[in-house]
Image (tube, coloured by chain):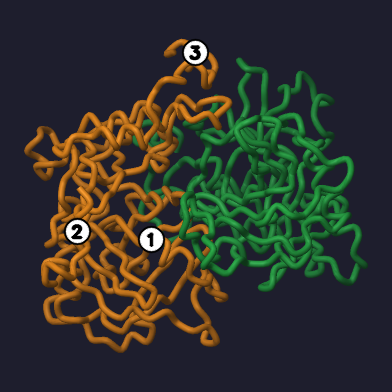
Chain colours: A green, B orange
Amino acid sequence: LFILCTLGFFTAAADAAKAPGMPQVLAASPAADWRAVDAENTLYLELPAGRVVIELAPGFAPLHVANIKKMARTRYYDGIGVVRVQDNYVVQWADPDNRHPLPPGIDRTPPEFDLPEPKSASGMPADAAFTRLPDGDVYAPEVGFSAGFPVARSKTLHRAWLAHCYGMVGVGRDIAVDSGSGAELYMVLGHAPRHLDRNVALVGRVLQGAQLLSELPRGGGELGFYTSGQAAVKINAVRVAADLPAGERTDLEVLRTDSKTFHDVVEARRNRPEDFFQVQAGRIDLCNVPIPVRNAARH
Amino acid sequence: LFILCTLGFFTAAADAAKAPGMPQVLAASPAADWRAVDAENTLYLELPAGRVVIELAPGFAPLHVANIKKMARTRYYDGIGVVRVQDNYVVQWADPDNRHPLPPGIDRTPPEFDLPEPKSASGMPADAAFTRLPDGDVYAPEVGFSAGFPVARSKTLHRAWLAHCYGMVGVGRDIAVDSGSGAELYMVLGHAPRHLDRNVALVGRVLQGAQLLSELPRGGGELGFYTSGQAAVKINAVRVAADLPAGERTDLEVLRTDSKTFHDVVEARRNRPEDFFQVQAGRIDLCNVPIPVRNAARH
């Protein structure tokens, strides 16, 4: 198989006909390969159409995440709206009129665009083992996953950073690199705009409900901003999950990206065993790897 | 610059602060670097919300394109609907009830998933010079553009094929590789699902109106299929542009992908000179390269 892949970049589907697909891999997964999402680092966007669940990444952008939680807890975001939907790029929400005063203690935040590459396991959050993908990347020397997030890194730069994959959430800013506070956030909804990597603070990933944002009408203005004639989509509330009673939470589990099951998911997607596939890619791009999420109540 | 890129994968924005951005590159482009889109190979999807313009690729999938034009001309598609919108994947349109009989002469079509790699310029359509991208690719040995379409190729396999980038249009099929006729089509609306390359016949690219498909409500069923409770989005008509009076056409021009201007566009996107960018990628992924389209009437 290795030789075939190296020579031809593709191998016949028949080679792996008996290999399990992703559904079989997940069905066979032990409970220990899943982790509950920390309610203290889970954000709910309550839209008229439903709830978007975001897992925050304090290990990568601690100052911005602290800002965002403070703004959620002081109700800063309640009643703001979606101000921009640019096709194949981002959906962005903010105070459309810049009338909401920022709560005390929130201001411009130093850029948290990347982190020092850890010299040892203790250099990053405890669960941030780096699971490297084998197939390379156009933008970075190495890519993989840490703590459930897509990550790129460079041993030359001695830096690691979150990658702009579909569903990742970032902090809007102006030209100045310290001009983002967290008051304005965006979600990637198109082909991964990896040129934004190391230019913006990514703060988390949508675990559920991404489609409630990606199916919104595209904005008619420059860069997809909504024009005055377009109805702004209101965000009813933004809450930290830990602040809600247990019965009102969406309890999700995420597959541990340093688990054997996740490794098997990656393999099942590098070489799709389903009958549909005439040829298998034998490779996978960082942002095509699914990070499985499931409802905790069902297991 | 080359050394910086090789060492670090990124270079400081200041290095190229005087380089023109894409808007400046396009504003300075000579008329000869643009081509009118052939009305005989342009398809209009007339949706209730507006027109989607698709440039067909007969050089890559001649049998499927012939089928699709015949079906358009016999009004097969009129009144069919969008049957599937899977988030971060595809939107698909087809006869939801399988009640439209296929017109005479349309049947299963042999797979046109890739082409023999041309040994000489005459081996591919006349305007299909291959403009190679310099930064590599996760899925294929070489990527670039031919005749305005994103293309991958392998000298080992001696094959070239269209790549599944955002906005590309393909032919739905069942398990059998010859089961696609063109009666069912899809557009990519998420991160490029490149594992579909060489598994499906791609037949064209959306030049205008992609957002009319990508902003549609996601389907609630398995794989994003619409369920019976969801209102299907109707396609009023599908027309070959050449069959409409001149006044009813959308006259577009596409930047020639073998032109100097296109080369400059690629460079302006590999190293974004805009002040916003703190670091420049120094690289670009095939599906992040814009293929500029403009309204012919304005020039």
Which numbered disc, 1 or 3, marks the residue that appears first in the sequence?
A: 3
Residue position marked by numbered label 1 in the rendering:
B210
In the rendered structure, the answer to whether residue B30 lies left or right of residue A276 reads left
| Amino acid type, mark 1 | Ala
Q: Is residue B83 visible?
A: yes
Q: Please provide percent x and percent y for residue A100.
A: 77, 54
Residue that numbered label 3 is attached to = B4
Residue at point 42%, 20% (across, down):
B18
Circle 2 crowding by C-alpha within 10 Å: few under 14, some 14–19, many from 20? some
- Of the two numbered discs 1 and 3 in the rendering, the one whose residue sits closer to the viewer: 1
In the picture, residue A76 is in which quadrant? bottom right
Q: Amino acid at mark 3?
A: Leu
- Mark earlier in primary sequence (2, 3): 3
The residue to which callout 2 is attached is B251
Q: Dots 2 and 3: beta carbons under 8 Å? A: no
Please, which chain is the residue tagged with disc 2 on?
Answer: B
Q: Residue furthest left?
A: B122
Where's residue B187, x and y in %? 37, 61
Q: CA distance from mark 1 to mark 3?
A: 37 Å
Q: Nearer the viewer, residue B132 or B240?
A: B240
The chain under label 3 reads B
Q: Residues within 10 Å of mark 1 (few under 14, many from 20)?
A: many
